[in-house]
Image (cartoon, grey):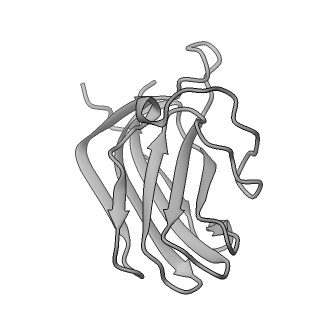
């Protein structure tokens, strides 16, 4: 049975993600339902000189979390990134263009760090850029049908 509830999280404006100058690969912990069918992911660079980029979504922390994220911490375990992926790697080679992924049935995931009785309500977004010499700003939109 497909849930009728929809949860959407937009990180835009003052909540947009910042990648500091010189960084090529950053991971952001985003507050999100602990289990759901992910139906939408949109990532677009909205500040700084436009660059090509790729994104990954993970169901557990497999990359060091950026200090400007909603939570930050060092890498807790050694789970391979491929095992923790929620979606295939999304690549945008054209600077200034967004990555847009929509799936009507959704990509099923559950945060693997918590338990059923004490869930961790996070999803992890990794942005990797081709190169940049200044801070870049990223707008992100995620939508899902939570599994209660």
For the point 66% across and 82% down, the residue is: 134
For the point 42% across and 61% down, the residue is: 54
Residue 6 in view (yes/no): no
Left or right relative to 44: residue 62 = right
For the point 55% across and 87% down, the residue is: 49
Residue 90: quarter of image: bottom left
* 84 shown above or below 31: above
The residue most toward the bottom is 49
- Which of the pair 3/28 is nearer the observer? 28
Q: Position of residue 24 (x, y in %)?
A: 59, 64
Q: Position of residue 94 (x, y in %)?
A: 34, 78
Left or right relative to 20: residue 107 = left
Query: Considering the image in quadrants, where does the N terminus appear?
Result: top left
- Which of the pair 79/47 is nearer the observer? 79
Q: Position of residue 59 (x, y in %)?
A: 50, 33
Q: Position of residue 34 (x, y in %)?
A: 53, 30
- Which of the pair 115/93 is nearer the observer? 93
């Amino acid at each position: 049975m497909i849930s009728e509830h929809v949860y959407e999280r937009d990180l835009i404006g003052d909540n947009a993600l910042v990648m500091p100058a010189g960084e090529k690969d950053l991971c952001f912990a985003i507050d999100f339902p602990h289990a759901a069918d992910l139906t939408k992911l949109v990532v677009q660079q909205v500040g700084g000189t436009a660059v090509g980029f790729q994104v990954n979504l993970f169901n557990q922390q497999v990359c060091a979390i950026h200090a400007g994220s909603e939570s930050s911490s060092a890498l807790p375990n050694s789970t391979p990134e491929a095992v923790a992926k929620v979606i295939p790697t999304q690549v945008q080679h054209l600077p200034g263009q967004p990555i847009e992924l929509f799936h009507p049935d959704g990509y099923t995931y559950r945060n693997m760090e918590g338990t059923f009785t004490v869930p961790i309500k996070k999803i992890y977004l990794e942005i990797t850029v081709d190169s940049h010499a200044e801070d870049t700003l990223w707008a992100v939109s995620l939508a899902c049908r939570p599994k209660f």
